[in-house]
Amino acid sequence: MLSYRHAFHAGNFADVLKHLVLVHILEHLKRKDKPFCYIDTHAGAGMYALNSEFALKNREFESGIARLWRRSDMPAGVQRYVDRVRQCNQGKELAHYPGSPFIAATLMRKDDRLCLYDLHSTEFKFLHRLFEKDRRIRTFHADGLVDSLGLLPPKERRGLVLIDPSYELSDDYRLMIESLKKMHKRFATGIYALWYPVVERQRIRRLERQLQDSGIGNVALFELGIAPDSKGRGMTASGMAVINPPWTLAAEMQRELPWLADALGTEKQGNCRIVNLVHESAG
Ligand code: SAM
């Protein structure tokens, strides 16, 4: 069942969006001099070699991070995300791409905490090795959707839960909404970011309705596409549904997503969407 390996996709245009939003949210949490807790329910291996046979199979990073690597005209927020990637390449050639746990680790302070889950035994082995010496970071070889409920609310009472599944099963969308409802019940003031692929637009419209009907308030969507919606062309866009987004996020995305759509779009067909899906008072 667990056949997905993120190494095939590391650094693609979906990772760019996901990790850009991640950097913004963590930077926002760092504005207060109080620790945060970051929970990554689907953490992956943590770091990916772009010269591995996995990454080279479809070379997805070439239409993602590689297109930004040599640009010097990026909006400031995009530049800060790219700087995280530079940090694990010692500022040289693009050879490694950091996963969400590593990006979060580069942003954490001495009292912040990271709790990272992965169910795949090989991915977990890499993840665990990467962070075993850092006492601020705990790794769990367990189901992140179920096990992380026991961590909520975190003692810091502030933090982010990133939910980044591979959607291998058609029931996964429903499962994510059910999990979000349970998490939100325990920790209503937390920030939650759910990544989703846009393969078939109808599926995403259903996800939006499920979010609207969930009883959770204050939900925004941020999408980045490299081609128009289409059936049968695979993933043309991806999005992040963010619950309790930092108040600065929408304005930052307004500045950065059109620029990224232009930089990453195929044949000038890049696009983006920013939607205030559920208002704050609706929860
Ligand atoms: N978040 C990572 C990043 O941005 O670098 C990528 C994660 S990848 C899309 C999804 C990961 O979730 C895979 O490594 C897979 O093994 C893992 N996984 C799948 N179901 C899981 C579950 N229920 N709990 C924890 N991990 C799971």
Image: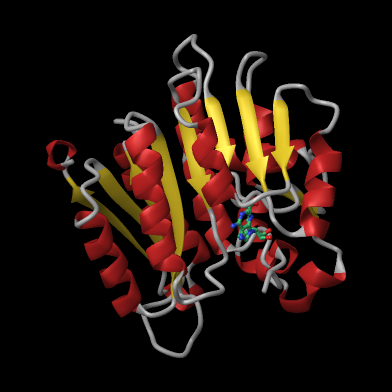
Left or right of 67, for residue 264: left
Colour scheme in use: secondary structure
Depth check: 116 or 264 in front? 116
The residue positioned 68% from the left and 30% from the top of the image is 106
The residue positioned 24% from the left and 53% from the top of the image is 214
Q: Position of residue 263 (x, y in %)?
A: 50, 60
Q: Position of residue 192 (x, y in %)?
A: 41, 41
Q: Quadrant of the C terminus?
A: top left
- On the question of residue 48 being in view, the answer is yes
Which image quadrant shows ligand 1? bottom right
The residue positioned 52% from the left and 22% from the top of the image is 36
The residue positioned 54% from the left and 55% from the top of the image is 164
Depth check: 198 or 157 in front? 157
Q: Is residue 125 above or below residue 160?
A: below
Residue farthest to the bottom?
A: 232
Q: Is residue 29 above or below residue 186?
A: above
